[in-house]
């Protein structure tokens, strides 16, 4: 392996999570442990690749020094401390001038290592940069580091950020279920959860079944075709069993035609990656229950707290998020490039190892909920899923508070 000396740059992209800053802290720790043998200085891109193009960089090596306290605060800070972006890169063969501009910036700051923390679209950035570097005479290494609460990235057992989001959903669902159970008046509560194409987040609402808690009556996922008539029949059957019905539904559930159930309340607009803007499935189903059944009904969205509730983060998730960031630095320094880091679950007692796969095989794919995790009826998850999830939500961090509020680190 040829030693590559120079500086490194790290950025965060896409939707933030409660654990993405723990991954950033892991990268910082990895560079500290390298002790200058390969990486002399670590820069941070403000707002991802957009910040890099503006040369809006922060010297993270100088900011953190050897401060363990700052790194601990970073790990308990929600959202993306470096800021984020949703910039889609052009294909290298269609806009070489764009990549020539990137290379010029890399050369200016002697950047030989590129670390990008993100989800599917961010791994697309790593894949395209890697493809261009293969045609360039500038030697550098690019590594993708996974994060997404959606848990829909290929090639990994689970994604950093998912465990904390799942823990928040599981705990919040316990609280909702107990709140809804205090009255004897027939009522239906519909809880809308994130997940456009995969149901991992919504499925987490049922983990109370194996954790000594409660579970919603039904769970509807994007992996299962949604039928409105069957949904209403399910609700009526649940009301016949008890007066307070609680339902978890993913924002991405679709009819057999492929149309999103919540699409009717949207403009039809899409983001720059072509993803439909979705919301409102809870309201659509609320109105359907009201009009068809006539009982008391309400819907609510857990919305942003699913990804920013750092006060309820999973210790397992934070530990693994920091671990994969540190492992990415080690892999790059050992010669790995054009790869995406992954968490591999071993057999027996729960533990993970950090591996990596080609970014070209990861980018733009969608990992669906395993078939064996979906109940045959299409309205629940199986015990197998709940057992699979349980290790990911274990443990809590002792947060640093000031004046009654958790302390957050900002640059």
Image (tube, rainbow, N blue to C red):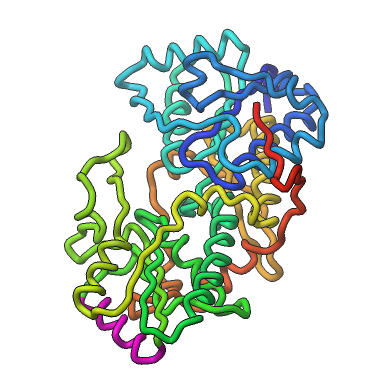
Task: Classify the position of the C terminus by image quarter.
Answer: top right
Judge by depth and name the residue closer to the eye, 376 or 166. 166
Q: Position of residue 61 (x, y in %)?
A: 73, 22
Judge by depth and name the residue closer to the eye, 405 or 336. 405
Give the prevailing secondary structure in the magenta stretch. helix
325 in relation to 111, above or below = below
Q: Position of residue 202 (x, y in %)?
A: 44, 64
- Residue at the image point whose x is 39% and y is 48% from the top: 365
Q: Position of residue 236 (x, y in %)?
A: 29, 85
Residue 252 painted magenta: no
169 in relation to 177, above or below = above
Q: Is residue 135 visible?
A: yes
214 in relation to 225, above or below = below
79 in relation to 203, above or below = above
Q: Residue furthest left?
A: 257
Q: Is residue 326 visible?
A: no
- Residue at the image point whose x is 51% and y is 54% from the top: 306
- Residue at the image point whose x is 75% and y is 43% from the top: 403
Task: Classify the position of the N terminus by image quarter.
Answer: top right
Q: In the image, which residues are magenta? A: 229-242
Q: Residue furthest bottom?
A: 241
């Amino acid at each position: 392996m040829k030693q590559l000396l120079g500086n490194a740059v790290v950025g965060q992209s896409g939707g933030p999570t409660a654990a993405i800053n723990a991954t950033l802290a892991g990268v910082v720790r990895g560079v500290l442990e390298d002790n200058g043998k390969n990486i002399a200085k670590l820069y941070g891109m403000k707002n991802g690749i957009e910040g890099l193009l503006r040369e809006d960089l922060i010297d993270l090596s100088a900011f953190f020094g050897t401060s363990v306290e700052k790194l601990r605060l970073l790990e308990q800070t929600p959202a993306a401390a470096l800021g984020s972006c949703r910039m889609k890169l052009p294909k290298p063969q269609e806009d070489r001038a764009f990549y020539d501009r990137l290379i010029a910036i890399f050369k200016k700051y002697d950047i030989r290592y590129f670390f990008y923390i993100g989800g599917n679209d961010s791994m697309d950035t790593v894949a395209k940069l890697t493809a261009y570097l293969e045609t360039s005479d500038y030697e550098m290494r690019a590594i993708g580091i996974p994060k997404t609460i959606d848990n829909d990235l290929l090639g990994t057992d689970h994604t950093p950020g998912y465990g904390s989001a799942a823990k928040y959903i599981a705990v919040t669902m316990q609280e909702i279920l107990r709140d809804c159970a205090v009255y004897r008046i027939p009522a239906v509560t519909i809880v809308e959860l994130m997940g456009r194409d995969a149901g991992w987040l919504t499925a987490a609402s049922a983990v109370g079944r194996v954790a000594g808690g409660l579970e919603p009556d039904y769970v509807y996922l994007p992996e299962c075709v949604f039928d409105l008539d069957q949904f209403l029949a399910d609700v009526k059957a649940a009301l016949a069993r008890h007066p307070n019905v609680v339902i978890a539904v993913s924002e991405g559930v679709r009819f057999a035609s492929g149309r999103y159930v919540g699409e009717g309340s949207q403009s039809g607009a899409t983001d720059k990656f072509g993803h439909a803007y979705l919301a409102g499935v809870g309201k659509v189903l609320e109105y359907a229950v009201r009009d068809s059944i006539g009982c008391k009904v309400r819907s609510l969205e857990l919305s942003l707290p699913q990804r920013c509730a750092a006060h309820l983060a999973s210790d397992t998730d934070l530990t693994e998020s920091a671990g994969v960031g540190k492992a990415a630095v080690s892999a790059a320094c050992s010669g790995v490039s054009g790869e995406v880091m992954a968490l591999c679950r071993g057999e027996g007692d729960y533990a993970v190892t950090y591996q990596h796969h080609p970014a070209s095989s990861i980018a733009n794919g969608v990992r669906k909920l395993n078939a064996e995790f979906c109940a045959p009826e299409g309205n629940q998850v199986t015990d197998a899923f709940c057992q699979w999830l349980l290790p990911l939500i274990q443990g809590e961090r002792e947060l640093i508070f000031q004046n009654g509020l958790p302390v957050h680190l900002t640059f």
